[in-house]
Amino acid sequence: MSPEINVPSHAEHVLETYPELRCTVENGDASERTLCIGSDETLEFVETLFDEVVDRFPFSFDVVHVGGDDWEMHGHSWDECADCREKMAEDGSETVTEHFYAFVRHLHRFLDERDRRTMMWNDQIDISESPDLPRDVLIQFWRVAAPGRGPVEGCSLERFLEEGFDVVNSSVRAAFVRGWISEEYLHGWAPRRRPTVPEGRESQVRGGELLAFEPSNERRRDYFERALPSAIPIFADRLWNPEPIDGGPAFGRTLTRHALGPYVPNGFDAYRELGGTILPTNWKRSGQGPPAHANNSLGDRTPREASAAYRAAIESISTLRDSDETVYPETATAYVDCLEWLLEVADRERRGVLDRP
Ligand SMILES: [Zn+2]
């Protein structure tokens, strides 16, 4: 476990309070989201901050996560800043990426002196170029940056492992409860195998972390609340169970029993009716990939057959809940709500109104 304070980007709140930590730019405005990493003020500020983190978290938190993600996407003013240019000349940094690595090396030295290991996100590290970063930095891999948001060519989880880094695997489609999780991917995921782990490098994958960021709007919240309850046990099973449960019907039945308790009828699989082990949601991501799980809910059944199955499932779950035989009554209620919603969907389809969620 490790506390995370994200620098140098994702710093808008810090910069609101301490505008002196922005770059010094003569013409135009300095970035409002990314710290100046060339000034002594910033270095003093982050040292004070991480000193406090080290003080507040006992030694069992021997890893400190310094963030390090997204600065290219958020924008920075390092090119135009007198302090940054001076620091780059001093350090011999020829690019802003090298300037960033020098900042990370500074933090690493600082934390190393306090017996803490530095951890950071992978997406701004150009691993194809054998970056000048200490190899004991623990890398949290989530995804290769998109074009224009960080290095892409030649970057992969595999390359980080080949370069000798240890990695925490938070591969985006398995780990981000933010609309990225693909149910199919998660069922087939294994932290020491996917996305790409070369043979013999498995032990460098030190674990995984499921990311549950506060949703930024209502649609995301709807997705978040429906995905999280089953994402946690599936992720945990993939991470910790040496023999993960097969992702097929057996998993649906096991998860039903886990979520609703020991009194569920033998073989009952609430998730089959729900179209998958992640609850269906109204929210569809536009473009690339998953998820809109409700599209699976009919399966190979006609709307009439599906409606009958939904009604039977609603009946079973409601009976269990109303006789206090569920472990988590709120979970049972959430399932019933989803099924009632799917019932409306199926009824609409039966009437020929093709308005699938
Ligand atoms: Zn600067």
Image: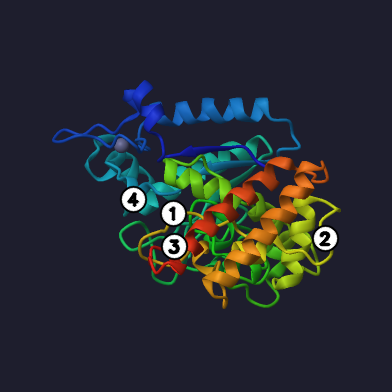
**Disc 1 C-beta below 8 A from ligand 1:** no
Real-space Cα separation, disc 3 to disc 2, in angstroms = 30 Å
The type of colouring in the image is rainbow
228 vs 9, left or right, is right
- Residue under label 2, please give it: 265
- Residue under label 1, please give it: 283
Real-space Cα separation, disc 1 to disc 3, in angstroms = 19 Å
Q: Residue at 46%, 39% (x, y): give it.
A: 7
State the image coordinates of residue 34 (x, y, percent, origin top left).
35, 38
Q: Amino acid at mark 2?
A: Pro
Tell me the quadrant of the picture where the C terminus can be found.
Answer: bottom left
Disc assigned to residue 348: 3
> Mark 2, mark 4: which one is toward the viewer?
2
Q: Residue at 58%, 42% (x, y): give it.
A: 65
Sequence order check, earlier mark of 3 and 4: 4
Sequence order check, earlier mark of 1 and 3: 1
Residue 291 in view, yes or no: no
Q: Are marks 1 and 2 in contact (CB under 8 Å)?
A: no
Structural crowding at the residue carrying mark 1, measured as other residues with C-alpha within 10 Å and reported as few (<14), some (14–19) or many (≥20): some
- Residue under label 4, please give it: 73
Q: Amino acid at mark 1?
A: Trp
Q: Quadrant of residue 273?
A: bottom right
Sequence order check, earlier mark of 4 and 1: 4
Q: Amino acid at mark 3?
A: Arg
Sequence order check, earlier mark of 2 and 4: 4
Q: Are marks 2 and 4 in contact (CB under 8 Å)?
A: no
Mark 4 secondary-structure assignment: helix
Real-space Cα separation, disc 4 to disc 1, in angstroms = 25 Å
